[in-house]
Amino acid sequence: MSTPKKLYIKTYGCQMNVYDSERMVEALGGSGYVETSTPEDADMILLNTCHIREKAAEKVYSELGRMRVLKEAKPDLKIGVAGCVAQAEGAEIMRRQPLVDLVVGPQSYHRLPQLEATTRSGKRALDTDFPEDDKFETLRHRPKAARGPTAFLTVQEGCDKFCAFCVVPYTRGAEVSRPADRILEEARDLVDRGVREITLLGQNVNAYHGAGEGGDWSLARLIRALDGIDGLERIRFTTSHPNDMSDDLIAAHGDCAKLMPYLHLPVQSGSDRILKRMNRNHTADEYLRLIDRIRAARPDILLSSDFIVGFPEETEEDFTATLDLIRAVEFGQAYSFKYSTRPGTPAAERAQLPDDVMTDRLHRLQALLAQQQRRVQDSMVGRDVSVLFERAGRMPGQMVGKSEYLHAVHVEDATATLGQIARVRITASGTNSLAAVMA
Ligand code: 5AD
Ligand code: SF4
């Protein structure tokens, strides 16, 4: 048997890219590749990229610059760019970086074996199509790698919302939901391979409406079906849009035992004027009332969100409204960004705010969010939570996992093993994690 070729894949951006990278490894497995964690060993390097903000996209070019030495040392090395930067700037990448052999978009990576063969014949390959054949179907029966107790599972992809700042509708394409039976099949297979927790992924995951028995299934219906899979202990989903939080899905948070009490629900801004300019199609008050309904169904739910500061025309008053919304909700987790102009999006045409104004607002917003996160994390001390053990800790006998609320928890006297879920008592709240002992 010939020695396997080695594939090094570096993943940027969101969790869906993590999922896609796993599928790319499976796709190239058929061409004789095994994954390596050292780029120096690789016969092929793939960068699975993110285009969401300018900084994320820039990383690709600097990383490619660093690859030059590797390619000089090993002329046979193939270098590929995948993901959303590939989709948005594929031809430009080829022009700017002669050392790139291959460009593949997020909807065509099931064709990697053919593209790789093209590069082996000395040609460059570019594929940023939105093909009719579906990557999920093509890769459905590829041999799968061993894995840990948690997994991502893409159920929906793309977005039809067209928020004025966002590239996703252009890079990932229109909203498409996978059929329910395929998702359930993939979930069962993951559970058979030791997975205990599945995070359902979609850019607009709560808009899921995949074909299923008796017609289109909602995300709530899918979650209820997953809830019935023996051996699957935890279900999460991300990312949701406030306008797609159906009554059914809210109710599932109250009565579906395996659905974890954590919800990432980006709001972006607390100003109605800015929300309108962002094309978010809801007001701050509607968001707050939605939060009330979710908390009525599941009082202990931990809420997370995304914020953009310095969106074009954001005034100090608009920004204050965002701080007010944050104070009204009390988030346990949050991600916040300075607005970044993305070519091709409607907001890119509008006047930008000075960078120092954006930086100042970001600092103030993050200070408030950090206080809230601290309060929520500290409030866990003395409570019993359940932890899914994901890895051994640094200290002997210590194990690390996540609570239902997605807090990292270090358990000092862990008797449970990797992949098990145990009840623990939180004893202290540290910088980025909680400490606990077996309950
Ligand atoms: N600038 C800054 N942040 C952005 N996001 C999306 N597009 C932009 C942009 N142009 C943020 C949003 C989104 C998260 C994934 O990234 O907050 O929810
Ligand atoms: Fe990045 Fe968005 Fe693409 Fe995910 S979908 S890789 S966050 S641009």
Image (spheres, rainbow, N blue to C red):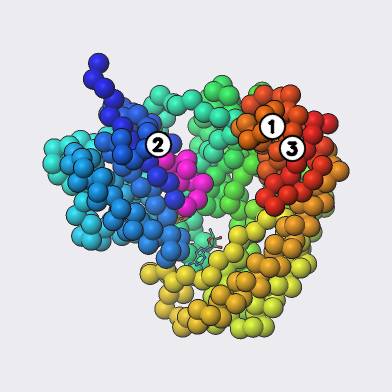
Measured along the vertical axis of the image, is residue 58 above or below residue 435? below
Write the start and end of the magenta stretch as one range.
13-21
- Residue at image coords 46%, 74%: 347
Name the residue that disc number 2 marks: 37
> What is the secondary structure assignment of the residue under circle 1?
loop
Q: Looking at numbered disc 1 in the image, what kind of residue is underneath it?
A: Gln
**Looking at the image, can residue 16 be seen?**
yes
Q: Give the side of residue 316 with respect to residue 310, left or right.
A: right
Q: Of callouts 2 and 3, which one flags the residue occurring earlier in the amino acid sequence? A: 2
Q: Quadrant of the N terminus?
A: top left
Measured in 3D between alpha carbons, the distance from the residue under mark 2 to the one under mark 3, in whole angstroms, is 38 Å
Q: Of callouts 3 and 1, which one flags the residue occurring earlier in the amino acid sequence? A: 3
Taking the view exactly as shown, the residue that stands out farthest to the front is 395
Q: Are marks 2 and 1 in contact (CB under 8 Å)?
A: no
Instruction: Measuring from the top left, give residue 352's x and y in whole percent.
Output: 47, 80
Q: Is residue 247 magenta?
A: no
Label 2: how many Cα within 10 Å (few below 14, some 14–19, many 20+): few
**Looking at the image, can residue 252 be seen?**
no
Taking the view exactly as shown, the residue that stands out farthest to the top is 1
Name the residue that disc number 1 marks: 398
Q: Looking at numbered disc 3 in the image, what kind of residue is underneath it?
A: Cys
Instruction: Measuring from the top left, give residue 108's x and y in whole percent.
Output: 33, 44
Measured in 3D between alpha carbons, the distance from the residue under mark 3 to the one under mark 1, in whole angstroms, is 31 Å
Q: Is residue 15 magenta?
A: yes
Measured along the vertical axis of the image, is residue 120 above or below residue 60? above
Name the residue that disc number 3 marks: 256
> What is the secondary structure assignment of the residue under circle 2?
loop
Q: Are marks 2 and 3 in contact (CB under 8 Å)?
A: no
Q: Looking at numbered disc 2 in the image, what kind of residue is underneath it?
A: Ser
Q: Quadrant of the C terminus?
A: top right
Measured in 3D between alpha carbons, the distance from the residue under mark 2 to the one under mark 1, in whole angstroms, is 26 Å
